[in-house]
Image: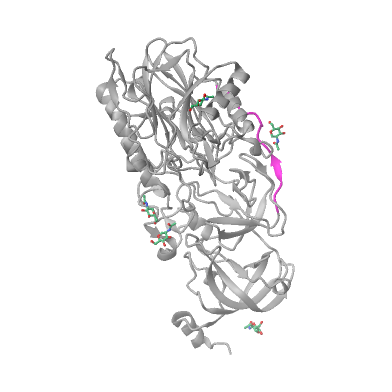
Amino acid sequence: MFPTPIGLYLGLFLATTNVFGTQVTDVQGPAFKSSLVGQTIHNLTGIVTAKGPNGFWISGAPVADPRVSNGLSIFTQDASVIAQVAIGDMVSLSGRVAEFRSNNSPDDLTITEIDNPTEIEVASQNNAVVPVIIGKDRSPPTQQLSALDTGSDGFLAVPNNSSRIDITDATLQPDKFGMDFWESLEGQLVTIPKPVALDFPNSFGEIWVRGDWAVTGLNSRGGLTITLGPDGRPDANPEAVIVGRPLDGTRNPKAFLGVGLSDITGVVAFQFGFFYVLPLSAPSIISTPTADVPVTTILSSDTDECTLTVGDYNVDNMTPRSPTHVNGVAKHIATFLRNPDIVFLQEIQDNTGSTDDGIVVGNLTLSALTTAIASISGVRYDFIEIAPINNEDGGEPGGNIRQAYIFKPEKLQLVSGSPAGGSLDSTAVVSDVSDGLTFSFNPGRVDPTNPAWIDSRKPLAAAWQTTSGHRFFTVNLHLTSKSGSASTQGDARPPVNLGVNQRTSQIERVSAFVRTILAEDTNANIVVAGDFNEYVQTRSAFTSLQDILFEADEIAGVDPVERYTFLFDQNSEQLDHIFVSNAIKGRGVDVEHIHVNNWANATTVTARPSDHDPSIAEIHLC
Ligand SMILES: *[C@@H]1O[C@H](CO)[C@@H](O)[C@H](O)[C@H]1NC(C)=O
Ligand SMILES: *[C@@H]1O[C@H](CO)[C@@H](O)[C@H](O)[C@H]1NC(C)=O
Ligand SMILES: *[C@@H]1O[C@H](CO)[C@@H](O)[C@H](O)[C@H]1NC(C)=O
Ligand SMILES: *[C@@H]1O[C@H](CO)[C@@H](O)[C@H](O)[C@H]1NC(C)=O
Ligand SMILES: *[C@@H]1O[C@H](CO)[C@@H](O)[C@H](O)[C@H]1NC(C)=O
């Protein structure tokens, strides 16, 4: 028995279970979640727009309100039910409204759907199926993801997870917020014209893309860089969308940064932490960027006594047991960075790599690297490291990753007279016999027993003197990782940026150390560089460094969109930074990020020795 008109009225407002005469747009409504959850809808009509292994999608009559989607997922895993409909069929069906979470992860948003449809009737066939053309019919906002990302650092603000979309369930603002925009198309068939890949595919073959619509943060390779937007808040690149596994079982091509794809038509869904377009069929590659990565224009400065070239490279768990890996890194340093005077390295593993055997010294790893560089370029580097305590510094178990320096001994040397520090020795600034500044342990670790460094790499500090007698100080960092963070489009707002509290404390420890040098000499030459595992747009983490050190990119005036060393999900982003003291800033700095790894293509990606790009800076000590 269907309800009478009075029953319908009660059905809507008193949540009895049977509703009749409802449209798809009534089910979707203007908010994240449906107000009709739990109700059984009868005679819901729409045109079938797509079919997949978990049901099909229909498109109902649209309404003018851009917040309200007229697409809907009809969930069933019964192949015989799916077989009853074809794309283009006008159908009528009944079923219960549900909000479904894709992988049962509490950080995922839900999809509005009709579960296990019954009473499916096909009224007519071969109706026109018209996708929404993104960039023409509707365009995504380009700055913010969610109204709940309050705070001046937007999606990177702390505290994180201070509110949740699932609970707030605000009505959508699709013109302002990217998550609201994609939600307003949930279940709808859309076309992405002229897609361009923003990253390598993930392990499921899914590809982040932008389409033929206005974007911000566009870099010269075609990616979208995390920058500060015109509103002064971090730009989260909400105009990007991930393309999932094709519904017809075909496979997405092996794209890479900057690849152009054929137009993609598919349905908008939320799964695995993100808004997706699930394509009807796989796109094909129609254009690829050039395979060439330019070598640096910054020349090694062997004969110039004031100038120093400084490399910085996270070499991704480098072990002497992989000559291919070592040779790949050596080639990058020798050929693409043109042998800088000193290179800050991160993720040097011990002599037995990830074998968890108590060995911590990494001199075979480093000598393998310097030998490989010498065999390519004839340039001979020395190296220094401080081995960590076994398995106390995080990273791959047994690998004991640490920072190290390689340097040209004919250009610079450690200031002599201080012992090398052990893993627990805290170095401090002191005056030496010639009344010059040096470190009590050289090299030495910065405050290594401070809780900020628990289960993380301790900074490696060193005091140097060039052959011409100029001193400078370095701190080589590798801050605690972001791994385990929430997805940028998850339920928790702002997203959980794992380890940000610890990274903030770690930067504070380093800032305190740098202040002790500056307290002795405001004109000290100081370089702090490495893998910070954080973007400078997370300004709260970098506050303590402000005013005492300056980022090379900023001094050099590098276009903000070209400041990236890493690709993750939809973003080109900078995790690796070179900061210098005021004295160095005053003499001008040049810096380049050499995209030897992130400009890899489908063939070369498997051979890249690291997922970070190296950087190189030219600084002047006098
Ligand atoms: C509703 O759907 C049922 C089952 O398909 C059908 O018998 C009935 O006529 C429909 N009612 C209306 C008003 O369309
Ligand atoms: C981030 O969220 C996690 C989990 O909700 C919480 O434990 C942590 O304290 C938060 N950290 C920051 C910096 O907001
Ligand atoms: C956010 O906080 C809620 C409740 O405090 C918690 O259940 C959820 O797991 C948190 N989300 C993340 C991503 O940590
Ligand atoms: C990838 O780069 C290599 C080396 O530069 C080149 O030989 C190859 O043709 C490129 N492949 C693709 C798919 O672009
Ligand atoms: C590595 O260090 C050990 C002592 O810890 C030393 O015996 C060995 O000669 C060193 N090897 C190289 C290649 O530096």
The residue sitting at 37% across, 41% down in the picture is 453
- From what the image shows, is residue 587 above or below residue 73? above
Q: Position of residue 288 (x, y in %)?
A: 68, 37
The residue sitting at 57% across, 66% down in the picture is 70
Q: Position of residue 347 (x, y in %)?
A: 50, 35
The quadrant of the picture occupied by the N terminus is bottom right
Q: Quadrant of residue 530?
A: top left
**Chief secondary structure of the magenta span?**
loop
Q: Could you tell me if residue 393 is visible in this image?
A: yes
Q: Could you tell me if residue 522 is visible in this image?
A: no
Q: Is residue 552 left or right of residue 261?
A: left
Q: Depth check: 610 or 423 in front?
A: 423
The residue sitting at 59% across, 43% down in the picture is 199
Q: Is residue 68 left or right of residue 521?
A: right
The residue sitting at 37% across, 11% down in the picture is 469
Q: Depth check: 297 or 613 in front?
A: 613
- From what the image shows, is residue 548 above or below residue 7? above
Specify the farthest residue to the bottom: 1
Q: Quadrant of residue 610?
A: top right
- Find the magenta span and give its range: 282-296
As for residue 222 lying within the magenta part, the answer is no
Q: Depth check: 214 or 307 in front?
A: 307
- From what the image shows, is residue 593 above or below residue 19? above
Task: Count the labels in the image.
Answer: 0
Q: Position of residue 131 (x, y in %)?
A: 64, 58
As for residue 283 lying within the magenta part, the answer is yes
Q: Position of residue 455 (x, y in %)?
A: 41, 44
Q: Depth check: 227 or 100 in front?
A: 100
Ligand 1 quarter of the rendering? bottom right
The quadrant of the picture occupied by the C terminus is top left
